[in-house]
Amino acid sequence: MNGGGSGEMTLAFELDALEELARPDAVFTDARQWTQYLGVVSDKPTYVVTNFTRKHRIHQDFFSGPRGKAESLDTVKRQFDTERHVFVGISDEDRELADEHDWEFLAVEDAADAAGWEIGSPEIPDAGAADDRDDWP
């Protein structure tokens, strides 16, 4: 999963894939070490994505907003010019979407295995963790 530390990768998680990971906050912290841009895309309403990322103290460079996944992948690819664009998802539909929009697809289980992330129900970070972050309001 590590792109060689070049940071020449844009990594997008489908919200459902992120919800499969035990420590989504730790996943984002880890992925920041080897990606240039990192975010979440979903067909769910904006407030659902925002609530999840706030609750898990995830700072993202982009998110779907009011757009769906397809439009979001196109927009992100135009805005964030990196050598690789990787979409982490969970379904065959996610794989097809990645192919249709010229993104590499990686199943969340494969991503977790390669990066050493734990699959499981997301844990809520400790309340004190916000004090350790300078990018969180």
Image: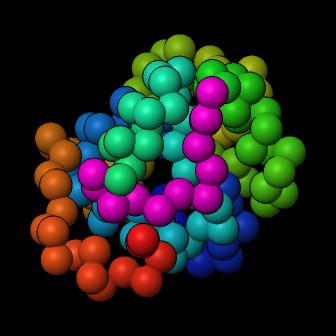
Quick check: 15 left or right of 82?
left
**47, 107: nearer the viewer:** 47
Q: Residue at x 69, y 33 (%)?
A: 72
User: How is this picture coloured?
Assistant: rainbow
Asked where in the image residue 76 lies, by quadrant, the reply is top right
Does 12 sit above or below residue 80?
above
Q: Nearer the viewer, residue 20 or 134?
A: 134
Q: Is residue 95 above or below residue 13?
A: above
**Residue 125, image x and y in percent?**
18, 63
Relative placement, left or right, of 74 versus 122 is right
- Residue at 53% across, 21% down: 43
Residue that sits furthest to the top in the current view:
93
The answer to whether 96 appears left or right of 56 in the picture is: right
Q: Position of residue 107 (x, y in %)?
A: 43, 35
| Residue 42 vertical position relative to residue 104 in the rendered view, above or below | above
* Quadrant, the C terminus: bottom left
User: Is 102 positioned to the left or the right of 27 in the image?
Assistant: right
Q: Give 131 or 31, whichever is nearer the viewer.
A: 131
Q: Main secondary structure of the magenta part?
A: loop
**Magenta stretch holds residue 17:** no
Specify the farthest residue to the front.
137
Residue 5, image x, y percentages: 59, 78
What is the magenta range? 55-66
Residue 111, percent across and down? 41, 48
**Residue at the spot 33% in from the left edge and 43% down from the top edge:** 52
Q: Nearer the viewer, residue 38 or 117?
A: 38
| Res 88 seen here | no
Q: Residue at x 35, y 53 (%)?
A: 54
Total count of labels: 0
